[in-house]
Amino acid sequence: MFLYLNYPSWIHPEIFPGLPLLGLIRWYGLMYIFAFGTAFLVLKKLLKEGALDSPTYKATEDDIFSFIGTGIVFLLIGARVFSAFVYDTSGIYRAKPWLIFWPFSSDGRFTGLAGMSYHGGFIGGLLGMIFWCWRHKQPFFKWADAMCTAIPLGYTFGRLGNFLNGELYGRITTAPWGIVFPGAERFSSSIEWVQNFAAKCGMQISTGLVNLPRHPSQLYEAFLEGIVLFTIIWLLHKKKTFDGFSGAIYTMGYGFFRFIIEYFREPDADIGYRIAADSSAPLYTNTSLLNISTGQILCFLMILGGVCVFVGSRYWYNKKYKNLENGKNA
């Protein structure tokens, strides 16, 4: 009896593999288009609800195009730069920074902008929103709330893109939904724990290297950080009592969900754990909750940042409300 799934052999990073020009179109890039399109539709819905209007200005659809366009540019820059300087350990981008946005490999093969960091995109997108609101004299927290309501549903497509690329897979597992990813690390079948692990999965092995089932952590993220987080924020967005509420919920919620999922997702082999109870602990399985990855550190900072935004924006709102009440009673 098989207690695992094989990664579908018909899925390739390219939508039309082997075809001239069309072979350059990749699922990951298409998922980005779906993500931004979904975010736009959610923003348009919020626009119709009047969520982007201020006492002195009525927002338009052109504002949404301008806002999301600025955010995309800053997001892509931040995601790529952060990936190049935080997650790359080869040092090539420090020595040759012009390669950060060079979409070809050393042999001339088109790769696109390979390597994007969510946390870098978060910082870049945040700076983009601040810049746009400053330039257009719009209330930042109101627009940030709208964007943070729109992001999770679009983010779902990004993680589906990772799954279609067969990347960012999780640690080995005996769960029946574990998937054998083609590009995952293989283990020698002569090792006793590998034999025992394979037996629990109903996997028949012989000699050589064995590819063991892994958590589809990309799908965990798509569900929790995407669909579930969107549902929470969407149900609460009409009940918010102050601007900054949805932004704080998103930042804390994403940080929390991603922190938990990082225990199932395998860290980058060349980085490993940033904090480890056991420095010799393997990456392919979780041996301690005290083994902390780069992503978990960044998510912890996101949670703290979300708490600060929640407390600060609520304090500012209450203070403003009291000043208005005092002015009426004067």
Image (cartoon, rainbow, N blue to C red):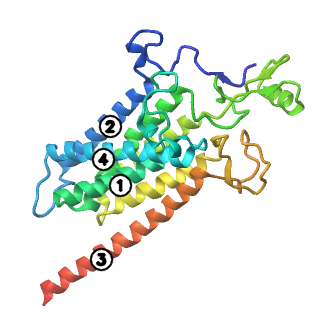
**Residue located 54% across and 49% down the image:** 86
| Whether residue 228 can be seen here | no
Q: Position of residue 156 (x, y in %)?
A: 43, 37
Does 63 sit above or below residue 204? below
Tag shown at residue 71 = 4
| Residue count near mark 2 (Cα–Cα under 10 Å), binned few <14, some 14–19, many ≥20 | many
Q: Amino acid at mark 3?
A: Asn
Relative horizontal placement of residue 141, taking residue 79 as reference (left or right) = left
Of callouts 3 and 4, the N-terminal one: 4
Name the mark nearer the viewer: 3 or 1: 1
Name the mark nearer the viewer: 2 or 1: 1
Q: Position of residue 5 (x, y in %)?
A: 65, 23
Q: Amino acid at mark 2?
A: Phe
Quarter residue 191 falls in: top right
Of callouts 2 and 4, the N-terminal one: 2
Q: Nearest the camera: 284 or 219?
A: 284
Q: Amino acid at mark 1?
A: Leu
User: Which quadrant, please, contains the C terminus?
Assistant: bottom left
CA gap, disc 3 to disc 4? 29 Å
User: What secondary structure is found at the residue carrying circle 2?
Assistant: helix
Q: Which residue is mark 3?
A: 318
Q: Which residue is mark 2?
A: 36
Q: Which residue is mark 1?
A: 126
**Residue located 53% across and 29% down the image:** 163
| Residue count near mark 1 (Cα–Cα under 10 Å), binned few <14, some 14–19, many ≥20 | some
CA gap, disc 2 to disc 1? 15 Å
User: What secondary structure is found at the residue carrying circle 1?
Assistant: helix
Of callouts 2 and 3, the N-terminal one: 2
**Residue located 59% across and 46% down the image:** 261
User: What secondary structure is found at the residue carrying circle 3?
Assistant: helix
Of callouts 2 and 1, the N-terminal one: 2
Residues tagged 3 and 1 counted as in contact (Cβ below 8 A):
no
